[in-house]
Image: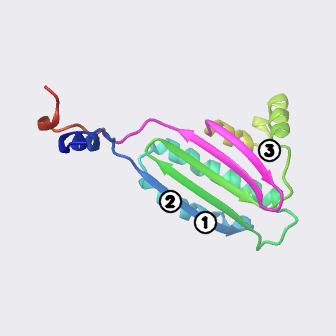
């Protein structure tokens, strides 16, 4: 590839953003404040503020569910692992727990049937599902359970443009 084609190819690549972080946090509801402080690092990500706030709520709900349900009978020292990956167009939030697992699709179907939106409890998965484009739950005996929220959004980064000297005539 010639120098001019290589330069053109490099300018065709759009600006991108990628931030990934992981935290292990104890199974204590009081640890939610520390978790939210950790999440604050993603405020600088190029995502709409409202989406950041929705993800913050989803994180709090997912963590609370792991602590209250999955780790209910486990020592408080049992870690919940949170992984967050943010790009200029996507968010992936994974919450790993060590609990016994549950019937994810059955619970969602029950919530759909019962209309649990106004209930005092049981709203966590409904909130997560409303935020996510894709919400999944995988259980791997011996390795744990993973609740995965995936969200796509329009990029707010400016597209790169080619300098006039590289444009074809």
Residue at mark 3 to residue at mark 1: CA–CA distance: 25 Å
Which residue is rendered at x = 74% and y = 43% of the image?
Answer: 125
Task: Locate the C terminus by quadrant.
Answer: top left
Per the image, label 2 sits on a secondary structure element best described as: helix
Which residue is rendered at x = 46% and y = 45% of the image?
Answer: 49
Q: Is residue 149 magenta?
A: yes
- In the rendered image, the residue lying farthest to the front is 1
Q: Check the image and report above or below for 71 versus 8.
A: below
Residue carrying label 3: 122
Label 2 neighbour load within 10 Å: few <14, some 14-19, many 20+ = few
The x and y percentages for residue 29 are 73, 64
Q: Main secondary structure of the magenta part?
A: strand
Magenta span of residues: 132-157
Per the image, label 1 sits on a secondary structure element best described as: strand
Q: Check the image and report above or below for 164 versus 70.
A: above
Res 116 → quadrant? top right
Label 3 neighbour load within 10 Å: few <14, some 14-19, many 20+ = some
Q: Is residue 30 magenta?
A: no
Q: Earlier in the sequence, mark 3 or mark 2?
A: 2
82 sits to left or right of 51 = right
The x and y percentages for residue 132 are 62, 39
Residue carrying label 2: 40
The x and y percentages for residue 122 are 80, 44
The x and y percentages for residue 11 are 26, 41
CB of mark 2 within 8 Å of CB of mark 1? no
Per the image, label 3 sits on a secondary structure element best described as: loop
Residue carrying label 1: 23
Label 1 neighbour load within 10 Å: few <14, some 14-19, many 20+ = some
Which residue is rendered at x = 80% and y = 58% of the image?
Answer: 68
């Amino acid at each position: 590839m010639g120098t001019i084609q290589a330069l053109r190819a490099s300018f065709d690549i759009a600006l991108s953003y990628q931030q990934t972080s992981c935290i292990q946090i104890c199974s204590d509801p009081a640890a939610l404040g520390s978790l939210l402080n950790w999440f604050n690092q993603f405020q600088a990500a190029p995502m709409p503020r409202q989406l950041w706030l929705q993800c913050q709520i989803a994180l709090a709900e997912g963590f609370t569910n792991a602590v209250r349900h999955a780790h209910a009978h486990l020592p408080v020292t049992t870690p919940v692992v949170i992984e967050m990956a943010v790009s200029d167009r996507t968010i992936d939030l994974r919450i790993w727990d060590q609990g016994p697992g549950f019937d994810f699709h059955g619970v969602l179907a029950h919530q759909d049937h019962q209309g649990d939106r106004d209930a005092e409890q049981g709203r966590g998965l409904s909130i997560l599902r409303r935020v996510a484009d894709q919400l999944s739950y995988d259980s791997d005996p011996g390795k744990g359970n993973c609740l995965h929220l995936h969200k796509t959004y329009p990029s707010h980064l400016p597209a790169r443009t080619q300098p006039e000297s590289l444009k074809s005539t």
